[in-house]
Amino acid sequence: MRILKGLVIIVAVASLTSCKGQKADVKSLETEIDSASYALGMDMALKVKANFSEANTDLFLQGYRNGMDSTNLLIADKDLNNFLRDFFQKQQAVKQKEAEEKAVKDAEAKYADVKKAGQDFLAVNKTKEGVLTTTSGLQYIILKEGAGEKVQPTSKIKLHYHGTTIDGKVFDSSVDRNTPYESNANQFIPGFNEGLALMSKGAKYRLFIPQELAYGMQQRGELILPFSALIFEVEILDIIKE
């Protein structure tokens, strides 16, 4: 862990100075050792400032002194590495969560019209004849019911699919390529996976997938913008036996 290594070095350098007593700042660097010593201290200070600005300097130095003479330890030395690892992992997780929340907020502001268009489309679509809705919000129409084996999440299947945006633009289609697709039935976006689990061999369904069951805030190519609702026609051609 680079941050931990940096902290260890800088606290050692700073504390050695503290233990010897505070000296007046020098005005120039006379030797290569002087320059390297100064550069190391400055480099580590910048790293700590960038990665752990909340550090309590007094306790920072006290920890070094206690460790050097092995007395008055407030944290047992056997627990030190685990504590530091867990602490910085939690710090990193908090920062990552904050960054993700900001990214979602920014995307929602930028693509609010896309999200609303999908919601409005699905609100109208669910009232149409033949449209069924699951508890998750997935909507589907049974174009042809299957008579074969039911698809399981772990089933390997051969299928045809035709994917469009809610305004009819095709973003991907095995039908247009005239090449069936083979995969396990749990390897797709959540709404697609859920739709497959409703189907049997020979079935053909049209799936209307809300953005939260599709790619959410991710953009996928030119046509699938963040928060896009998607439509798929899916036909189960075969369930492949291993």
Image (spheres, rainbow, N blue to C red):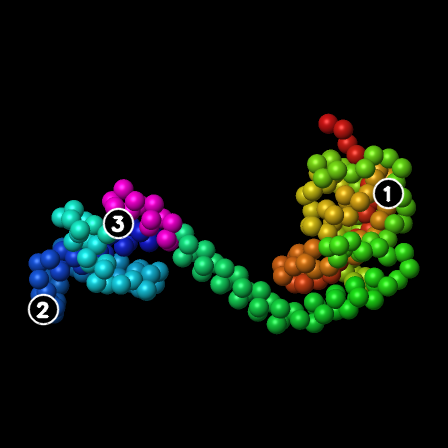
Residue under numbered circle 1: 203
**What residue is shown with label 3?**
75
Work out which residue is located at the far top of the displayed protein and give it. Answer: 242
Which is nearer the eye, 178 or 63?
Answer: 63
Please tell me which residue is depicted at 67% across the width and 63% down the height of the picture: 227
Assign a secondary structure to mark 1: loop
Q: Which one is in front in this view, the residue at disc 1 or the one at disc 2?
A: 1
Residue 201 position within the rendered picture, expressed as x and y whole percent measured from the top left: 84, 38
**Residue with the mark numbered 2:** 24
Q: Is 235 rendered above or below residue 139?
A: above
The reply to whether residue 39 is in sight is no
| Residue at image coords 91%, 59% | 129
Rendered location of residue 137, percent (x, y) = 75, 57
Separation of disc 1 and disc 3 at Cα? 64 Å
Of helix, strand and loop, which mostly describes the magenta segment? helix
Magenta residues span: 76-88
Along the line of sight, the residue nearer the viewer: 47 or 60? 60
Residue at 8 percent across and 58 percent down: it is 20
Mark 1 closeness class: few <14, some 14–19, many ≥20 residues within 10 Å: many
Q: Nearer the viewer, mark 1 or mark 3?
A: 3
- Residue type highlighted by circle 3: Ile
The quarter of the image holding the C terminus is top right
Could you tell me which secondary element the residue under label 3 belongs to? loop
Q: Looking at the image, is mark 1 or mark 2 earlier in the sequence?
A: 2
Q: Any mark on residue 11, and which?
A: none
Q: Is residue 10 left or right of residue 25?
A: right
* Relative horizontal placement of residue 90, taking residue 214 as reference (left or right): left
- Tag 1–tag 3 contact (CB < 8 Å): no
* Amino acid type shown at disc 2: Ala
Secondary structure state at the residue bearing disc 2: loop
